[in-house]
Amino acid sequence: MGIDDWSWKKSQIYGTIIVDLERHVVIDILEDRTVETCTKWLRRHPEIEVVSRDRCGLHAKAVRQGAPQALQVADRFHLVQNLRQAIEEQMNMHGRATGRALLSDADNISTDFHLQRSRPAHRESRKEIFTTIHALREQGLSCSEIERRTGLKRRSVAKWLKSEVPPDRRRATLKPTSPWYFEEILAVSWKKGNRRGRQLFHEIQSQGYEGSYSHLQRLLARWRRAEKQTSTDLVTRPARLELVRDPQTGHAISPVVAAALCIKTQGTLAPDQARKVDALKAGSPGFATMRSLAMRFRCSVPASGGSGRG
């Protein structure tokens, strides 16, 4: 079976939808998406053997409590989404602002260093997207055509067009499903020398953490990598992937657009998108490598009738 959020009212009221993935039919729709509600439903169905879900810690906890016999698997959509986000981070050269490293006191380096490096990159990326979308609009292109050319969703295109200046991207409000919500607690234990992932996991679980262990592992991995770096390593600015421009419009192809195109199979690319991909592969060896790896990854989780050739 599959379990996911269900929107009763877009971006305001959410429930839970449960689907039989073998018969492709909806089994039930729950009134909310709380752990308690999902757990009660799952306990009434002990026959469930496999649960496909997204990365939501609430669903993971509900399955652990309500259907401990079931195997939990990640659905294909979110696997590919993870890949796209990783590619975008690489194209942005520094990663997300929320992925800053926690440095030990002995390092004598500001913990804001990664933020100071990543924010300009994200601002530049947003500026490139803003310029590209508005330039295409000034050429008389419709939202649908801009969507097709850039690879962005129509709703995103409409939002960018409503803005007179590049919008400021604010950090989303942290929730108990994110280990960053418990950053202060983790930081105290980390500086005291507690580096065991399971111990830290149980510690924040007792404080209300609702996310997964793997989510916490990703945070801790960043901290461990940061501690291995020397001061010299940190102040050396890494080389940015080559800037590539659309050969037709002359506009720079933003990391967001490049990441979206990088994971699209050859058969699903529109002609102008294929042109951008060819330009990116020719102008950026880094993109060409990521494109090749992305297609290999997609072949390992193929869609029905999809082609993995890039």
Image (cartoon, rainbow, N blue to C red):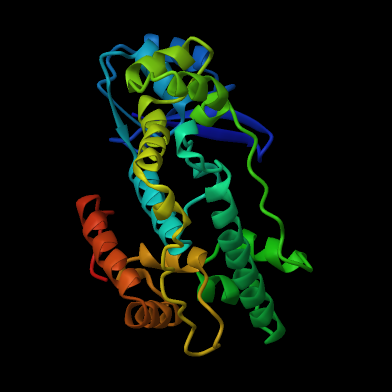
Q: Is residue 96 left or right of residue 42?
A: right
Q: Residue 254: x percent and y percent? A: 52, 70
Q: Where 199 falls versus 137 (above or below)?
A: above
Q: Is residue 229 left or right of residue 40?
A: left
Q: Where 220 falls versus 228 (above or below)?
A: above
Q: Where 280 falls versus 15 (above or below)?
A: below
Q: Is residue 298 left or right of residue 188?
A: left
Res 106 → quadrant: top left
The quarter of the picture where the C terminus appears is bottom left
Q: Where 50 falls versus 139 (above or below)?
A: above
User: Is residue 51 among what the camera can see?
Assistant: yes
Most extreme residue toward the bottom is 248
- Seen at 33% across and 20% down, the residue is 196
- Seen at 38% across and 73% down, the residue is 269
User: Is residue 19 among what the camera can see?
Assistant: no
Q: Residue 79: x percent and y percent? A: 34, 45
Q: Residue 235: x percent and y percent? A: 47, 56
Res 261 → quadrant: bottom left
Q: Residue 46: x percent and y percent? A: 30, 11
